Amino acid sequence: MFDLVNEILQTLRHNKLRTGLTGFAVAWGIFILIVLLGVGNGVTNAFRENMLSPGSQRIEIWGGRTSKPFHGYKEGRSIELKNPDIATIRQENKSFVNDVISTIYGTTQEISSGRYSIKTDYNGVFPSEMGLHNESKLTKGRFINDKDMSTKSKVMVLPEEYAKRLFPDEDAIGKRVAMNGLSFQIVGVYTTGWGNAIYIPYTTAQMLMGKADDLGSISVQLKGLSTEEEGDNAETQLRQTLSQIHDFAPDDKRAVWIWNQFSMGMRGMQVNNILSLSIWILGLLTLLSGIVGISNIMFVSVRERTHEIGIRRAIGAKPRSILIQIMAESVAITTLFGYIGIVLGTIATTIIDKIFGNEEMFQNPTVDLGIAIQVTIILIIAGALAGLFPALKSLKVKPVEALRDE
């Protein structure tokens, strides 16, 4: 084993410039591969965060107008979503419906604590709203609950920024603010990565806006779906359910407008998979130039050591030992310079992460341990292949001819 290591080191020292230049090609190929994979991960991570998060696995529905006659009704009839639609959708589609909610976006109002005031709009929401936003977390108090919904309670949940502006010197929980001529109690404060929505119960917002039963839209939270086909089937079943409730043709796509975020996310993931495959192909093609260089070095090395190989064969060295030596030298050179490329590539992706890693469409552009292991395996296989053909050529050297070689 030590003899093999010494022979590898001697080979590296004997042709420093040639080995260094060829090794640089390998290191550069691995460096490019790591950086490309890191950038690809950044795009994929942002896509997963924005399009495949629990809050994005949903189908949004709005009322529309019929485009064809049905059951005696003429086309052009307005379809308006109602409160009972929520319960019916839940009941009829239990297999894939996790929750059904809606949101009312109120107009800008003045919210006053007495001494301080702000002007902003509000959102009327269901209790599950907070769980849909990964970037939002309650820091004090609670969120809106089912009791608030059933009693149309005048309660409010504020973002930290507004809580501090309205109550700069005291805890906002339990305090009251005035909005639209009504008194609301602050029951919760939350942090958020973006936006500053003020939440009140959906039923309370309906009362404020005079919408006793109308829904502007319905958001269906999905569960148990994993493919685009399943998402499309869920959309079809939801349209079928609403067609039975509002008596319009099941294939009338204008009667209700549906935005299937889940299926759209699945299609986007297919594009991401193609992007990842393309990155691997480009990286491996870049690495290929270095591997060819390593193979050429080993061919030259075999040619220069023909005399040595002949002597070893003449004194009884087995072909297997010569084969192992040539391939081991190739693997060693490839792995050594490959790991230099891995280290430099990891440093580069870390720098990219520091500069761009928090962008909405580019998050955490780094490579994990699994990628490093995959690249290591590629290096070993590539090094073995680079040394295989020169090693096979060395076995064809006849001892007598080799001893005559100068």
Image (tube, rainbow, N blue to C red):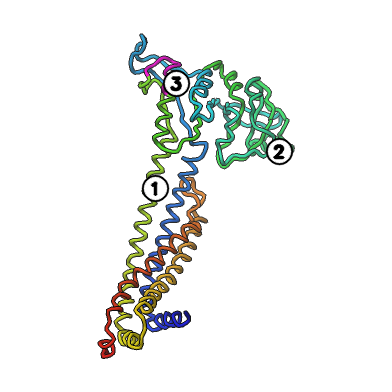
Q: Mark 2, residues whose alpha carbon is within 10 Å: few (<14), some, or many (≥20)?
A: few
Q: Is residue 246 magenta?
A: yes
Which of the labelled discs sits on residue 168, or is there none? 2
Q: Which three-letter amino acid code belongs to the residue tagged 1?
A: Asn
Which of the labelled discs sits on residue 216, or is there none? none
| Quadrant of the rendered image containing residue 247 | top left
Q: Mark 3, residues whose alpha carbon is within 10 Å: few (<14), some, or many (≥20)?
A: some
Q: CA distance from mark 3 to mark 1?
A: 34 Å
Residue 125, above or below 352: above
Give how far across and how far down residue 115 sits, in percent. Answer: 71, 31
> Bounds of the magenta span?
239-249
- Tell which of 331 and 49 is nearer to you: 331
Q: Nearer the viewer, mark 3 or mark 2?
A: 3
Q: CA distance from mark 3 to mark 2?
A: 50 Å
Q: Quadrant of the C terminus?
A: bottom left
Query: Which residue is disc 1 drawn over?
Result: 273
- Tell which of 59 and 203 is nearer to you: 59
SS state under label 1: helix
Query: Which residue is disc 3 drawn over?
Result: 241
Give how far across and how far down residue 327 sits, in percent. Answer: 37, 74
- Tell which of 89 and 16 is nearer to you: 89
